Each structure stands twice: as structure tokens, then as C-alpha cells.
Amino acid sequence: MSDKRPSPPTGRFAAGDQHMSGSQAIPMGEGKDGGRAQGTGGGATTFPPARPLPPPAPDRLRSGQFLEAEPLCGSVGAGEIACRVAISADAPALAAFAARTFVETFGHLYPPADLAAFLAEKYGAAIQRQEIEGNACRTWLAERAGALLGYAQAGPVDMGVAHAERDLELHRLYVADEVKGAGIAQALMQGVLDWARAQTAEALWLSVWENNDRAQAFYRRYGFTHVSEHKFMVGKTADRDFVWRLAL
């Protein structure tokens, strides 16, 4: 799993995929495509207090503890948006949304053959289901009336960097273009941070595309700092990504 390049509400990343245009990725080192772990199913998970971050505007989505299969709600525009941990049944919708947002955000950068090879390797319902059902990773979804509006994925560090054993990586963070600026990126990011701290990770890593200024600005607000660089491969095309780290 390695399509991780988080990107900001308007760009590319993911702890794996970051470029901007159309639907956006949220800066997270949008890595590339990491495994996703399912929640323990059912009850609420208690997390330790997160470090304070600038709160979203009062009319934006509220962040907080994520229930395993139940929504945490806030009002954004017309309708209620819920954030929750993904379950196996979400795999088909997540696969379609993940592929669409990557193509809309970064697809214009690559030759068709490279893009097709990348999508085949990183996306698909079977791949997403395997990641969701795994024990090492976790996927968070933001949705309204059953429609997926954003997602984040985090798990073991999948980049070639020296790191502590329990460190984690933000592989992907994407938000649909029509709800950019609604606080969804912040809510998803808070869920990732709370989970990483609950796992006693010493640091959270991500890779962000060198030209994704918006994603970089988003991550800097949380305290991520530049450590090194690496190549993010899309087929045979090599992108230059920055490797960032946040001490937890």
C-alpha cells in the first residue's frame, strides 16, 4: 500500500497523493495508498486529549471523538455531515471516490498508461476492503446523506525513512471540491491525530508533493516539519515529494 500522499482541501498529497484541482486531497503526506484498519466495531473509542489546534469557525464541522460505526455530526451548508470510521461495506464507495479524487486532482500530470497502472495497483474495492479489514491501518470517512465527501487513511510508515517502531504515517487525505473550506479536512485530521496518539506513536509522518503549496500550509499549521525528500511513483513517472514529520 503505497499511494500515500495527503493533500489539503484543495490539493494533492496523501500521506500519499497530492496535487490540486477539482476534488482535492488534503495535505497529509497523502501518502500513497496505505492499509486501513477497521474499528473494533460498535462502541465509542476513548482517546487521550489532543493537543489544542486552531478551532474551525462556529458554523463549520465540529471535530471530536470518532465512534467506530456511528457518526459525529456537524452542519455544513445544506445538510448534516457525519465523520466515522470506515467498515467493510464502505469499500466499493471508497474505492470509487478515492480513484475519482486522485484523477481529478493529479491525473493531468501523468501519461495515460502510468495513471492507469497506478489506479489498478492502488485502488479498487477489493484493495480497499483488505485495508479496512486489516489490523494495522484505519480509514475515516466524511459523508452527507450517504454520499462520501472526504476520507483519510493512516497506518504504519511506508516510506524509506528511519523512524521509531510505533510511528505512523498519514497515507491519504482528500475532500470533495464542493465542500472545501467546510472544516472537513480539519475534522478528519483530528481523528487521525487522536488515533495516532492513542496508539502511543512518537510521530506522524507524511509525504507531500513539492508543488502542493496549499497542502504544505495546511500541514504546517499542525506542526509538521520538513525532514527529507523521496520519489513518489505513478507508473513510471517519478514525482518529487517532501517527507514531513510531526512529533506527537
Image (tube, rainbow, N blue to C red):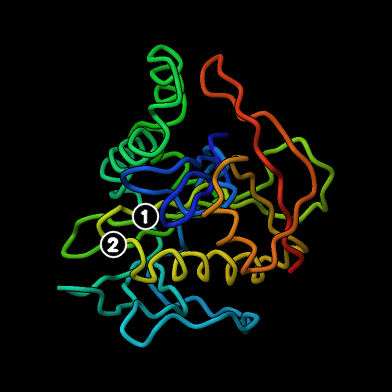
Is the C-beta separation of discs 2 and 1 under 8 Å?
A: yes
Q: Quadrant of residue 247?
A: bottom right
Mark 2 crowd level (few <14, some 14–19, many ≥20, 10 Å Cα): some
Residue appearing at x 41%, y 75% in the figure: 43
Callout 2: SS: helix
Q: Nearer the viewer, residue 50 or 10?
A: 10
Q: Dividing the picture into quarters, in which one does residue 181 lie?
A: bottom left
Q: Position of residue 92 (x, y in %)?
A: 27, 40
Residue drawn at x 39%, y 37% is: 102
Query: Where is residue 16 shown, x and y percent of the image?
Result: 55, 41
Side of 37 relative to 76 (left or right): right
Q: Amino acid at mark 1?
A: Val
User: Residue 179: which disc?
Assistant: 2
89 or 27: which is nearer to us? 27
Number of labels in the image equals 2
Q: Residue 175: which numbered mark, if any?
A: 1
State which quarter of the image contains the N terminus: top right
Image-based side of 24 in relation to 241, left or right: left
Seen from the viewer's position, the closer of residues 59 and 4 is 59
Numbered badge on residue 225: none
Give the Cα distance between marks 2 and 1. Answer: 7 Å
Residue at horizontal 82 percent and vertical 49 percent from the top: 163
User: Badge 1, how many Cα within 10 Å: few under 14, some, many 20+?
Assistant: many
Q: Is residue 192 above or below residue 158?
A: below
Look at label 2 and name its amino acid: Val
Residue 100 x, y percent position in the rendering: 30, 37
Residue 167 position (above or below residue 101): below
SS under mark 1: strand
Point 34% across, 79% down: residue:
60
